[in-house]
Image: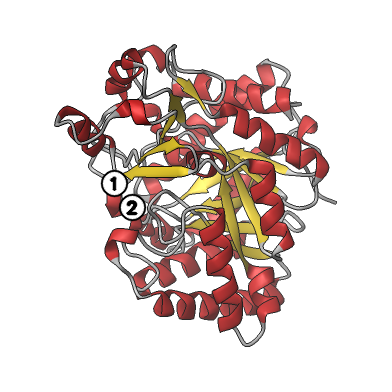
């Protein structure tokens, strides 16, 4: 019988992604789990959000180094014992960032190695090997990953598709051996190999055509639907999610997340946005004029175009920026967020509770948020749980 992590989230599994905490080795990762993660659980217990006897789900992030270390020296069995002792469990792993994810320039490096490289394949297999050793029966076991590459890399899609098909077959065999429902979620992202609903549908059509058995692809390769990313594309959540299901694309996991939104014609909003212009992560910018979307690879490029007069913000009626904002904390006016699209995702869930079992809160930008949005990280995460459950 499935054990939901939180009573109010029904039969689905809800976690927060531990990529919010800096950790690159297994020792560092385990320190995060045994301190921050358990502290978040304690806050949820204190607020009566969850019972003391409930199992608490962990959305694990492992770097390639940490994954390799976890598979050695009996560490996996020790970790499984710790999960049992603490009544915690892992149903999903974020396998998008391969290497360092905090405190240094990440930006396009988060797409390396991409899905044309063997290192990405082996890393992803390691993550599923870990899930095979620790996942509870009947929870399913997912890994999220990049959509393939970054558009600027001009990667060969035929290699990406070939590697995905081979991974799907390997994963199907592993599922047969272990009894786990394994699935890989490809995460569309602005300027990724595919980034919006239309491009996602088109890619999966080609991927299904590539496979000898498209049913294996349908079982093992799906979409990691990030609410922030699709909102950035001005793709309405209900329409996008229903389109994916209609196309027989599995919704592997849903990231509950929110982006910055503003009116670019408001000069004070552009001034306020400067506080979010930081050097670690990509903050892609998408401006809309009617049905047309203008894209900038990052905030510095946007501000440079603005400064030299190459861009007239008065020509646009909406602007969205890839900067994850805590779900329970709107940025100060005149900025706002795309949180309404996250509410639409939760509304969709009520109508399609069996269409996706895995949900994850992901606001990894805590360390670079402006001061007015800063608070102790455990309080931020507990606050986001509260918001999600209040609107679920």
The quadrant holding residue 301 is: top left
Residue nearer the viewer, 175 or 260 = 260
Mark 2: give few (<14), some (14-19) or many (20+) Cα within 10 Å: many
Any part of residue 50 in sight? yes
Whether label 1 touches label 2, CB < 8 Å:
yes
Judged from the image, the secondary structure of the residue bearing numbered disc 2 is helix
Image location of residue 235, percent across then percent down: 57, 44
Residue drawn at (26%, 38%), measured in percent from left and top? 280
Residue at the outermost right position = 1
Q: For the residues marked 1 and 2, what is the alpha-carbon distance in whole angstroms?
A: 6 Å
* 135 vs 293: above or below: below
In-image side of 8 versus 252 (left or right): right
The quadrant holding residue 377 is: top left
* 261 vs 290: above or below: above
Image location of residue 125, percent across then percent down: 49, 69
Any part of residue 185 in sight? no
Residue nearer the viewer, 249 or 52 = 249
Q: According to the image, label 2 marks what residue?
A: 110
Judged from the image, the secondary structure of the residue bearing numbered disc 1 is helix
Image location of residue 311, percent across then percent down: 25, 34
Mark 1: give few (<14), some (14-19) or many (20+) Cα within 10 Å: some
In-image side of 254 versus 115 (left or right): right
Q: According to the image, label 1 marks what residue?
A: 107
Residue nearer the viewer, 269 or 9 = 269
The C terminus lies in which quarter of the figure? top right
Residue drawn at (57%, 28%), measured in percent from left and top? 339
* 353 vs 263: above or below: below
Residue drawn at (28%, 40%), measured in percent from left and top? 298
């Amino acid at each position: 019988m499935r054990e939901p992590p939180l009573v109010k989230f029904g039969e689905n599994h809800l976690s927060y992604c531990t990529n919010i905490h800096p950790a690159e080795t297994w020792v560092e990762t385990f320190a995060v789990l045994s301190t921050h993660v358990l502290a978040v659980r304690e806050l949820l217990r204190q607020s009566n959000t969850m019972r003391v006897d409930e199992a608490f789900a962990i959305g694990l992030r492992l770097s390639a180094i940490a994954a390799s270390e976890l598979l050695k020296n009996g560490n996996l069995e020790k970790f499984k014992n710790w999960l049992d002792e603490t009544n915690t469990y892992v149903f999903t792993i974020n396998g998008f960032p391969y290497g360092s994810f905090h405190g240094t320039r990440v930006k396009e490096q988060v797409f390396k190695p991409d899905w044309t490289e063997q290192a990405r394949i082996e890393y992803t297999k390691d993550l599923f090997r870990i899930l095979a050793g620790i996942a509870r029966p009947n929870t399913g076991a997912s890994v999220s990953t990049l959509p393939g590459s970054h558009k600027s890399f001009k990667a060969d899609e035929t290699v990406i598709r070939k590697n995905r098909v081979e991974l799907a077959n390997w994963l199907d065999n592993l599922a047969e051996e272990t009894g786990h429902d394994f699935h890989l979620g490809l995460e569309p992202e602005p300027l990724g190999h595919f980034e919006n609903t239309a491009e996602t549908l088109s890619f999966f059509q080609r991927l299904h055509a590539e496979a000898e058995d498209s049913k294996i692809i349908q079982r093992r390769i799906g979409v990691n639907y990030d609410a922030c990313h699709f909102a950035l594309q001005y793709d309405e959540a209900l329409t996008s999610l229903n389109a994916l299901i209609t196309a027989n694309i599995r919704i592997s996991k849903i990231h509950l997340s929110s982006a910055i939104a503003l009116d670019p014609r408001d000069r004070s909003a552009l001034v306020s946005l400067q506080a979010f212009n930081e050097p670690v992560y990509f903050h892609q910018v998408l401006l809309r004029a009617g049905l047309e979307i203008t894209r900038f690879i990052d905030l510095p490029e946007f501000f440079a175009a603005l400064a030299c007069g190459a861009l007239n913000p008065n020509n646009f009626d909406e602007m969205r920026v890839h900067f994850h904002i805590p779900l329970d904390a709107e940025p100060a006016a005149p900025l706002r967020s795309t949180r309404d699209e996250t509410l639409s995702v939760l509304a969709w869930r009520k109508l399609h509770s069996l269409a996706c079992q895995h949900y994850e809160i992901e606001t990894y930008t805590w360390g670079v948020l402006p001061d007015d949005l800063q608070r102790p990280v455990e309080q931020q995460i507990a606050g986001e749980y509260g918001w999600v459950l209040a609107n679920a």
